[in-house]
Amino acid sequence: MQKTKIIKKIFVIAVLFLLAGFGAISFGNRAFADEVSKLEDKKENLVDAIADAQKELQTSKVLLNKNVVQVNTTKTVLQQTESDIARKQSELEMLSNRAKLNKSILENYLQQIYFSNVDPLVELAVTNRQTHEIAENFDQLLSIKERINITLVDISQNEEAISNVKSELADKKVEHEKLLQKQKAEQGAIVADINETTATLAELQKKFAKVQSDLNALMSASYDAKDIKDAVGFASDKTGVPKGVLYGFLTQESGRGKNVGQCTYADVEKVSLAGYKKYGKKYQASIDRLYYREKLFNNIIDSLGYKSKKVSCTIPFSSAGPNQGGAMGAAQFMSDTWGGATGKQGYVPQISSITGHSKPDPWNITDAVVAMAIKIRGAGGTSDSNSAIKKSVINYYGAFSQGYYNTVVYWAKNYKTLLD
């Protein structure tokens, strides 16, 4: 950072030297140099703040990923514990059923013992059985009773052991549930930090774009392309989006600037409202969006000094969905995407920071192509590979279109031949 400040000071001194015409520095030039220095300082501070915010954001994302793994692990453990509890409950029910069965058998044998517990002489007289036979039967009954009692004791002990395990598992389940609740609370806090940092980062980037725009304007660094080819080259150099990709998107959107719209916004409103009326109130949100876009459109043309401007026409639509017109210029941006007339939203600040135009114009070929390049870059289109083009088409267009994709790929691979 110290090296950057030194370079900045050298730059300011050089500007002063040139403005002074190798002579005394005028008061106006001093004021100019001071303004440049202030803007450079602001820019450096914003660069530092953006870097800190990005670092904080990355740290929070790492923590979030770690937290998600922890939450998933705890959920898995909790599910396993609940499964173990259910299995132990099933074992207890089986032991209970075995105990009931053995108790029933025991009751039966006890009845037999009771009824067999008579005078052996009487039984001998009545049944004409041998003494040793009666004794053996009696001994067998007693032996069975003893075995059943042993089984019941064993069952009781097993029930107690399983109940203890089940109780321990229940305690663990409570612990896991508390841990899961804590981890989810931590996750919520991390997500809140990410959202706050993201909002801060966006605000810092807007401020940076504004400072850069002011610097560009102050240094008369604005750029106006001679034609579509010049605009594509400039935008590609500034954003890293391949020229062929830009030509492909421009071909699909406006025939490379040849068809930027044939309708007034009044035409768009008329056709759109007729379609909405025909297919019912389910398109109320689309109607509200139409009026909002029209308001922003009027703000844009007023701020740029236009009395009127043509936009894309509304394509008649069916109950499947609306297809509003209103897209502006070679890049075919909607007014709410462009950013309205205030320059505080959408793509306006970023366009201004590159072209040096304080009021970017969607019908200006330089501003339009730069806006398209910025959006494609944000959509992942910094390469002319098929996968990158597919990703950028989906994000730029809002859905995957095979025809759109084919056009961009074709131009990306063949633009040099096609332009010759």
Image (cartoon, rainbow, N blue to C red):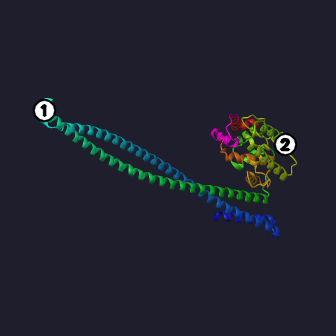
Disc 2 target residue: 266
Q: Identify the residue at image location x=63%, y=39%.
A: 387
Q: Locate the C terminus and report the quarter of the image it occupies.
A: top right
Q: Identify the residue at image location x=41%, y=51%.
A: 170
Query: Please, is residue 153 above or below residue 26 in the view?
Result: above
Instruction: Evaluate whether residue 313 shows in this view.
Output: no
| Amino acid at dot 1 | Leu
The percent coordinates of residue 405 (x first, y second) are 68, 36
SS at circle 1? helix
In this rendered view, identify the residue nearer to me: 52 or 197. Answer: 197
| Amino acid at dot 2 | Ala
Query: Please, is residue 53 above or below residue 281 in the view?
Result: below
In which quadrant of the rendered view does residue 419 lie? top right
The magenta segment is: 385-403
In which quadrant of the rendered view does residue 131 lie? top left
Disc 1 target residue: 124
